[in-house]
Amino acid sequence: MINLSILILIPLITAVLVLLSQNAKQVKWVALLGSLVQLGYSSLLMKTFMADRAAGNTAQMLYQSKTTWFGVPNVLQIDYFVGVDGISVAMIMLTAIVVFTGILISWNVERMTKEFFFLLVLLSLGAYGFFISLDLFAMFFFLEVAVIPKFLLIGIWGSGKKEYSAMKLALMLMGGSALVLIGLIGLYYNTQTLGGQHTYDLMQIAKMHIPIETQRIVFPLMFLGFGVFTAIFPFHTWAPDGHSSAPTAASMFLAGISMKLGGYGCLRVATYLMPEAAHEYSMYIIVLSTIAIIYGAFATLMQKDLKYINAYSSVSHCGFVIFGIGMLTKTSVNGAVMQMVSHGLMTALFFGAIGMIYERTHTRLVAQLGGLLKTIPFIITIFTLAGLCSLGLPGLSGFVAEMTVFMGAWQNPDTFSRVATVLACSSIVVTAVYILRAVGASAMGPIKNEHYLHFKDAAWNERLASLTLMLGILAIGIYPFWLTNLIAPDTQIIMENLTRGLIK
Amino acid sequence: MLPELSLTFLIFLLLFLKIWDGISSAATIMHLTNFLVLVALVGGFCFTGTGEMFNGMFHTSKIINFEKAILTTGTLIIFLQSFDWLKDNKNGVEFCILMLSTLLGMDFMISSGNLLMFYLGLELSSIPLAAMANFDIHKSKSSEAGIKLILSSSFASAIMLFGISLLYGTTGSLNFTEISMRLGHDQLQLFSFILIFAGFAFKLSSVPFHLWTADVYEGAPVPVTAYLSVISKGSVVFIFITVLFKMFAQFTDTWYNMLYLSVMLTITIGNLFAMRQDNIKRFLAFSSIAQVGYILLGISAGTVMGASSAVFFLIVYTFSNLGAFGVISFVSQKTGKELISDYRGFYANNKTASWVLTIALFSLAGIPPTAGFFGKMFLVTAGAAKGNYALIGMAALNMVLSLYYYLRVVKAIFIDKSDEPIEKLEGSLPMKIAFAICMIGIVCTGFASGLFEYINTITAQ
């Protein structure tokens, strides 16, 4: 039987063991082993979950466990309440893969190795906790756990203007969580359970009818707050700087996991709990996300640094997540979740490949690269595949996810949604331009620099990491139904709650 | 009464030991003091009397005993931290005596049920503080701090005393409960309340009565600064809660509005000034002003949860702030460096001290999983009970502001490079014990929900 607390315990134990390790080599192996065990357990969770669903278990949240954490009658009720549905299972699986590959990629970190891996593991702990929590307080707790390690990761091991980026990222994300906090407390005082007690219990709140006046205040706070994590326009500015200054593994975590925390929060907390307000505000969400999609794509065109290219394209791609949620149809929400998973894998692979290139060439400027396909074929192939996934080539995960979002968006018959969808679609063309340009310039052509000839191709750890991520991308791209089957029953439940908002 | 008696005994014992000069070294006396304070602390936990004495002048209950235990724990940590500093000082014993007398004053103050007793305790707790602030007798900054503290605190006392006399004139009583029953809509009573409130605000250094804080904190020796910012403030918060909730229950709306304004200003101004500081003591002074704002935010709701979350936060705050001050006093005693820029590259040679300072600062900033997160969350949750979004929004956004300056120090420690980082420092055993207590406190008090639940139960009684 699955016990979800193990998902928090494994990183916790790993973190302690990392601290107790004697030397750098031990640290790496402990961290890798921990993440491998976690990956195994997550796969087991997914397998069991799918089996249980197939066996007809239609409960909304499986493997629930609830213990009172802070319980003072009539004063405060906070539970340690965990449970998963298909969406969280998909997110957990994504996190496990990205953490595993991230640790593999950072095998060559030499300075302060112990601290580096400790912070990585701590970050993953926050993400796992966030995805399994069903108590808003605990959720918020884990969300914040996942913020501060990033500051240190970027500040200490980063490159470029790292101090500036680290501070900007930490402050903007904390600003986001401050908005969430205001919304959280506002929501808390408008809930009443049977005993007259307020509650943070997500499942109970979902069944309540939060007064529309409260929703009107709380929903934008929550949505924008979580949106900052997903780099919603105009709060996206931390993303390019943060991503580009971060060390490779931190970029992978940031884009692959951290931005998904926001998307998940927007869906699970803001939209699910406050359906009436979600309908009222959906227009603004669509406007903001369309701007993010198009602006992100055009901004990418102007970038010369590979990491900046992927960072801005992440802004654009995460715009699709918000776009899908804002469209509020079953298919589009499905697409949003798929886009989260797909983008998480794809961007991790992309950042990983860029990291590998950077480690060899010591430059990320497209203009200085060239002809690398001849010297490091494996890495460049991976790089190209990630790029193709990013521009939505059929057969890879990006296509499936974006297609689903557009299909869902088109189901809204009004002109406004149609126009927005067409505009968002057009960004794909721009994506193709910048991806092909970057890939072409760095992979093809003459070799720009003599010593590019002496590069060694990917080492075992890099190959393993790339192949793991590639496997995920192909699995979604070629046979998307397992993912749809995993998440669809649960988006259905969210949709039912949403239509309740529509009828009223 | 037991904590007070044992403290009095301890003070006299130290006095005799001092008179028989040369009977034992300062270090031995320090160890003895630490041990006896510990005994007093444990004794205070085990033998908790409740009830009244002297016709309601002195009363004690479970929550009051608990508050006294918090103050004693904090004092013990400060004693442990100042061991290195005092062991070679020929006046070290006097320092202990002075500190214990203020602690005695605070105990009387929070146990008081009568304004006279309250005033007596307040004075006993503030006059020796000025002598302590002036303890580095050869530094002019220290003398400046001493004189500023005594002048401003006597000014505050005078204002408060004026309020008390007006209150006595209009109600004819000094007893808390009797006053609360005789309060009406008298303008003079309101005026006296405002005077008393101002006196408290002065002691708590909440805006606009905060101006003395930074200079005094900067000039005073670091252990005294720590004492001022944690123990002294903590005790005033405790009695402030009693005074507001019990004595001025009639004026709830008035003091809600006053606190509302005060919280807004205190948090914002504290944070804005903290950003601009280069001296780490001044920086912590302003950050502690902002922290007081959060405490007042919790109290402002006037609920049991408000009171208990303030008490809970003070425990967390004791450990966090003393952890931070511990490292600063450690560095300042060994090297005399007190600027944030001096801490550049601190991590290179002092790994443990860096982590202690960082975790303590994270706890002050309210970053999980430290206890500071829980403390702040409970205060904000309590403060939100009246549904004032503006207040909560301001408090939450200020958390972001405050994160900026806490991260500035963290950045100096971990990220910035320095050509001459502070060399490796060796701490004595008491110092290490103090750090260990603070770290355990920061890590454990948050998760341990039992503590908060216990405080809630005894506050509600």
Image: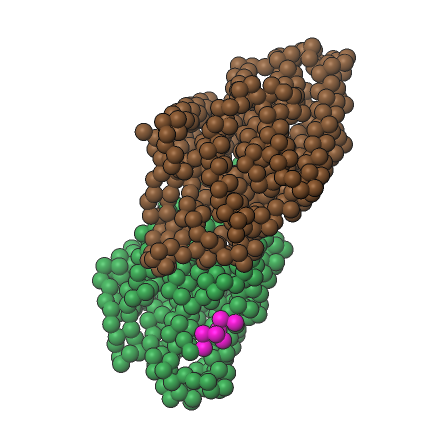
Asked whether, in this view, residue A140 is left or right of residue A456, the answer is left
Residue B256 shown in magenta? yes
Q: Nearer the viewer, residue B168 or A231?
A: A231
The location of residue A81, given as percent across then percent down, is 38, 43
Looking at the picture, the colour scheme in use is by chain
- The N terminus of chain A lies in quadrant: top left
> Residue at the location (51% across, 40% down)?
A495
With respect to residue A435, does A78 lie above or below? below
With respect to residue B113, does A230 lie above or below? above
> Residue at the location (36% across, 51% down)?
A70
> Residue at the location (51% across, 28% down)?
A484
Instruction: Count numbered badges in the picture.
Output: 0
Q: Nearer the viewer, residue A2 or B362?
A: A2
Chain that the image shows in green: B
What residue range appears in magenta? Answer: B251-257
Q: Nearer the viewer, residue B322 or A484?
A: A484
Chain that the image shows in brown: A
Q: Nearer the viewer, residue A60 or A91?
A: A60
Whether residue A217 is visible to the viewer of this picture, yes or no, is: yes
> Residue at the location (43% across, 88% down)?
B170
Whether residue A88 is visible to the viewer of this picture, yes or no, is: no
Q: Quadrant of residue B93?
A: bottom left
The location of residue A93, given as percent across then percent down, is 47, 28
Q: Quadrant of residue A243?
A: top right
Task: Give the main secondary structure, helix, strand or loop, of the magenta stretch.
Answer: helix
Residue B375 shown in magenta? no
The location of residue B141, given as percent across then percent down, is 56, 63
The location of residue B418, given as percent across then percent down, is 61, 39
